[in-house]
Amino acid sequence: MSAGIEENVLELQGVVMTFGGLMALSNLNFKVRRGMIKAIIGPNGAGKTTLFNVITGSFPPTQGTVTFNGRPIQHLKAHKIADRGISRTFQTVELFGNMTVLENVMLGCYTRIRTSFMASGFVLSQARRKEKQIRENALKILKFIGLAHKFKDLADSLPLGEQKLLEIGRALASEPELICLDEPAAGLNETETHVASSLIKAINAKGITVLLVEHDMKVVMNISDEILVLNYGRKIAEGPPEDIRNSPRVIEAYLGAEA
Amino acid sequence: MLRIAKLPIAVFALFILVFPWTARRIPAIEHYPDIMVFAGIYCLITIGLSLLMGYAGQISIGHAAFFGIGAYISGILTTNYGMNPWACMLIGMAVTAVVAALVGTPSLKLKGHYLAMATLAFGIIIFIIFNEETQWTGGPDGMSGIPGLSLFGFEFDSVERYYYLVWGVVIAAFIFTVNVIQSGTGRALRAIHASESAAGAMGVDVARFKILVFVYSAVLASLAGSFYAHYLNFINPATFDLFFSIKLLIMIALGGMHNIWGAIVGTGLITFLSNEWLQYFEEFEVIVYGAILLFVTVILPEGLAGVPGIVKGWFRR
C-alpha cells in the first residue's frame, strides 16, 4: 500500500451482534473497496440495518472488529465515527423536522466546521466567518441534490421523496469517505426512485464509497458494483450483480427452497 | 434560518432603561422597580433553563438548588470569611459548574427524561442540607448580615442602582444565549431535540452538549443566587425549595418553551403575580399557578411567546 491509503475503506472481521438470545449478525466478514458502490440485500430481518448501526456506532458489536481506513472503529461512539468520515441515512427518515431544509444540511457540516460554545455566545468574527462558510457549503449541496429552491421550507413539510434526498444531502455535507444509505428508494415512486439512483451514482462519481441497503432490486442491480447477501445475520453470497442474480442460494433465501 | 430579531431586544433594553424613571413618578407603581429586581434575578435562571428545556429538550426540576448554592456560597464566604463578594460570586459559579456536571453527567448520557428525576432528588437533598447544616447555613432561620455589592467605591445600595446592575447582567446573558441559539451550537441543540440518533450520526456529541447546556444553565442560576443574597442581605432555605423549581418551570411554560423571549415574558408575569397581584390569594395562589399551567398546556402550547404568531395567522386569513 502506498502512502498509507488502504485499498479497502471498510473491513469487517468476525462481527457478531447479539440482542439477548437473538443473534442478529453472526461471524460476518467482508470488505468494501474504495470508490465502489456495494449493496447489502437480504430478506426482512436479515440484519441489514443492524449491520449499519454497528458500522456507524449506534451500538458496538458483541464481538469482532470494524476497520475504517486501516484503524479499528468498533469501540467508537457514533459522533466519533462521523468525524472519521462515515456518514449515514436512516431507514425511517430521521430529519430534524423542526428545522429548515438549509439548516438540516448546515448541521451536516458540523463534522468539518464547528464553533465552540463560548465563541458562538460572543459571536467572534471567526465564528461569523465559519457560519458563512457553512451556509455556502450547504447551499452548494442543496444545488447538487436539487433542493436549492426549497431551502427555506421546514424539513417536515417536504414529500417523502424529497425528505430522502435531503437526508442524503445532510449526510454528504459531512464530507464523508463512506456513505451508508439505508433504503434510499423505499416508499418512492418510479420517478423519485430514478432521481435517487442517479444521485447515488453522482455521489459515487465524486469518489465517495457507497454502502447501500435496498430492497428495490432494479436499483441494486443497476448501480452496484458488488452485492453482499445476508440471511439470518449470515453472509450467504457476495459478488458482482450478475453472479448474485443467478446464485441458487440467494434465490432460495428469497423464494424458499424448491419442493 | 433561525433568526431572532434585534429590534425587539433594543426596544426591551430601552424599556428596562426608562422603567424606574417612569415608575418613580407614578405612586401606584412606585415600588415596581423592587419587584423588577427579583424578576431580573429569576430571568437569569430561566434564560438558561429555556435553552436547556426549549432548545435541548431536557427537563430540570432542581434549579432552585443551583440558585441556592450560589446564594449560600456568597452568603457564607462574605459573612463568615469577609471575602470579596465578586470573588464569592465566581467561586459560587465554579462550584455550581462542578456540582452540575457531577449530577448531570450520569443521567444525560442516557436517552429520556432521567435528568428530571436526578435533579428532583438533587434539589431535595440540597434543600435538606440548607436546613440541617445549621453551623454553616443558619438552618431554617436562615442567615442575615450578607453585605451589599459595591464596585470601585460605587455602592449598589439603592433599589434603582441594583436594578440597573441586575438587568445589565440579564441583558448580557440574554444576548449571549441568543447568539448561541443562532449559531452552529444552537443548531446542534435543536438537532438533539429533534433526533438524538441523527444528531449523533452527523458528528454531534449528544451527551457532551446536553451536559454543557445543563452546566451553563446551572451557572446562571448560581449567579442569580449570589445577586439574590446580596440584594436581600438575608437568605433562608424556604426560598430554594422544590416549589421554586416548579415555579421556574411554570414561568417558562407560560412564556413559551421554544422561544427564548418566553423566559423573559413568563418570568416577568409570574414574578409580578406572586410578589404583587396574587397577594390576596395567600396560600391559594398555588391554585392560580395550577390554573395557569393547565390553561397554557391546553389553549396555548406555544406559551405567550406564541401569541404574536397566532395573531399574525388571523390577519393572513
Image (cartoon, rainbow, N blue to C red):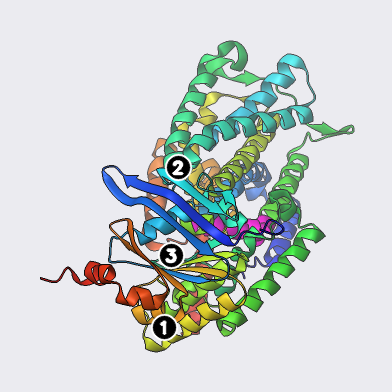
- Determine the residue positioned at 68% across, 72% down: A137
Give the main secondary structure, helix, strand or loop, of the magenta stretch.
Answer: helix
Across and down, in percent, residue B106 comes to 49, 35
Residue depth check, mark 2 versus mark 3: number of the one nearer the observer: 3
Q: Which residue is mark 3?
A: A90
Q: Secondary structure at mark 1?
A: helix
Label located before the other in sequence (1 or 3): 3
Q: Mark 2 falls within which chain?
A: B
Q: Mark 3 falls within which chain?
A: A
Asked if both marks, 2 and 1, belong to the same chain, the answer given is: no
Q: Which residue is mark 1?
A: A193
Q: Mark 1 falls within which chain?
A: A
Is residue B179 covered in magenta?
yes
Asked if both marks, 1 and 3, belong to the same chain, the answer given is: yes
Residue A231 as seen in the image, left or right of residue A105 = left
Per the rendered image, the range of residues in magenta is B178-194
- Determine the residue positioned at 67% across, 42% down: B37
For badge 3, the amino acid type reads Phe
Residue B258 as seen in the image, left or right of residue B232 = left
Q: Nearer the viewer, residue B21 or B43?
A: B43
Across and down, in percent, residue B223 comes to 67, 36
Residue A76 as seen in the image, left or right of residue B145 = left
Q: Nearer the viewer, residue B98 or A237?
A: A237
